[in-house]
Amino acid sequence: MATVLSIADAVQQRFTQALSAAFPDAADSDPQLRRSDRADFQANGIMSLAKPLRANPREVAARVLENLTADEVIASLEVSGPGFINVTVTDAAILDRLAARATDARLGVGSSTEPGVTVIDYSQPNIAKEMHVGHLRSTIIGDALVRTLEFSGEKVIKRNHLGDWGTQFGMLIQYLVEHPDKLDEDTEPAESGPSMSRLNRLYKASRALFDSDTDFADRSRRRVVELQAGDAETVASWQRMVDESKLYFEAVYANLGVLLEDTDAIGESYYNHMLADVCSDLEASGVAVRSDGALCVFFDDIKGPDGERTPLIVQKSDGGYGYATTDLAAIRDRVGMLGAEQLLYVVDSRQALHFQMVFETARRAGWLPDNVRALHLPFGTVLGKDGKPFKTRSGETVRLMDLLDEAVDRARTVVAEKSPQLGAEELEDRARQVGIGAVKYADLSTSRTRDYVFDTDRMVSLNGDTGAYLQYAYARIQSILRKAPEGVSPTAHQGLTLEPAERALGLLLDEFGATIDIVTETFEPHRLCAYLHNLASAYTTFYEHCPVLKAPSREIQETRLLLCQLTGQTLRQGMDLLGIGTPERL
């Protein structure tokens, strides 16, 4: 089905034509159409247009109105205040769009006819280490952006940049070679699923030995060289750790309900064979220079506390490579091989300077051409109730699995109290949807760059700005639709006069497509969360003031059922873009 032209866009078109007719020299002026509490819309652009014309704003507004008339979309127009134009739209226009959106699988939201290619880098856990609360935001935000960009028509390539290479693997592998039985030990029951407990014990034991035994430390350093050289035994041990870790990552992603798969996991090791060429090409082109034996890129506007320029080190003085080298190789690969037109990095705000230097280096080298956009999408920190970075009581970083289990446990209590008739299996399914949805919504509803407090009691509340509130609104709508009398179906009946709550809900439903556009332009999922919460709140007001199952006539009942149906469809689609489940009953 073709994209449904929103009422806002239809009114915008009419104003643009009227402005062009009234003031040909100002044909490109923006009417600045906004939703208003004084009417359905208000055009605020007359004020800025009047200034260069040296005319009275109210007189300018009057001339614009001479070229605007009431029609099938616009019911009435009036000049307000110093020169604003208030616009009221027709009930027919609202009903037309409700009917069109309700019968379209995409709710009348178009997709790009010329999709680009976006590579998005997110989650980024480390091999042999458990995922912790610090991985939550990158994983959830990245997943929501993938879903939204794909819905808009973009071709999206996911990249989970695993930390699977580095000097620590020499220590881990050497310990594993000398103690091959350690990785087979498992103190946890099989039903608990893939676990990182074995690798955690391996890391702690190897670190303790590395710090206390110089001979083992020397053997570990030699093992790093063997790993880099491709020694078969060493690579096999490394691969064993990678495989074990991936099983665990997949279990976490399944628990979270995100789209990442094993094929999206491209670790640092993938770029190893490219690093030498990255360095030689940078040095040959003069982008990088030798400084105290290291290969560096300098920036005039980036200096340290001592006033000296802070370099990006792409090769250490001992010949080793760092994160910068790998990130540059990744850019080269993603643009050159994957055809990326947009690179997105969902990484915490502490890496802002790193990405600034990496992007500028890639631009200088010609690996990041002007027609390719590269953006670091920083995010804030998850805090405990004390307002400090979230830690366990012993001061350790909170395991991500523990955090999710806590949310599901709390949700199970809430759901059981709300619906005591649920069987054990259904209760568990609802608890998981509500608990995981609560965690995701709490994260995504916060502006990406802000910190937020992780509070499971607030997150799973059925009231307020929570994921559970949206899920409850959706479930309540489905209950109403199931109770509709036989032979009565959701239908928009033209000629009806809509109640204020019906109009407000209908106009808000018409804004879904514009909201998706904003999210794909700003990469800020919290804007979709705000829209969905406003929609659920508007539905609550509608439900309180406009009886559905006890409507005064069949026409009114069917029209209100259509409002219910489309609200449910929009909530479901919107929450799906956030990666949040929508239980039919709650």
Image (cartoon, grey):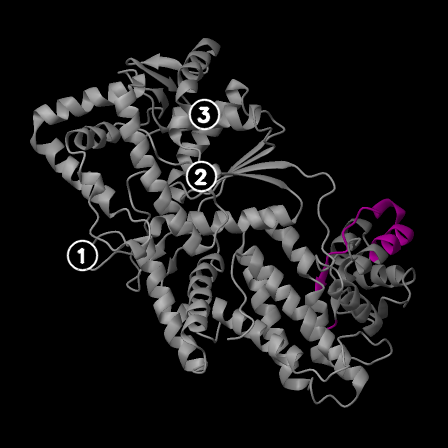
User: Does the segment drawn in magenta span residue 22?
Assistant: yes
Seen in the image, is 255 located left or right of residue 181?
right
* Gap in angstroms between the C-alphas marked 2 and 3: 16 Å
Q: Which residue is mark 1?
A: 394
* Gap in angstroms between the C-alphas marked 2 and 1: 30 Å
The numbered dot on residue 543 is none
The one of 575 and 355 positioned closer to us in this rendering: 575
**Crowd class of label 3 (few under 14; some 14 to 19; many from 20; radius 10 Å):** many
Q: Which residue is mark 3?
A: 328
Depicted 233 relative to depicted 466: above or below: above
User: Does the segment drawn in magenta span residue 42?
Assistant: no
Q: Earlier in the sequence, mark 2 or mark 1?
A: 2
Seen in the image, is 250 located left or right of residue 84?
left
**Could you say where residue 441 lies in the image, as x and y percent from the top left?**
48, 61
Q: Amino acid at mark 2?
A: Asn
Local secondary structure at mark 1:
loop
Q: Earlier in the sequence, mark 2 or mark 3?
A: 2
Q: Amino acid at mark 1?
A: Ser
Does the image show residue 108?
A: yes
Give the magenta-colored segment's residue range. Answer: 15-39
Q: Amino acid at mark 3?
A: Leu
- Residue farthest toward the top in the current orientation of the protein: 284
Marks 3 and 1 in Cβ contact (< 8 Å): no
Q: Earlier in the sequence, mark 3 or mark 1?
A: 3
Q: Which residue is mark 2?
A: 160
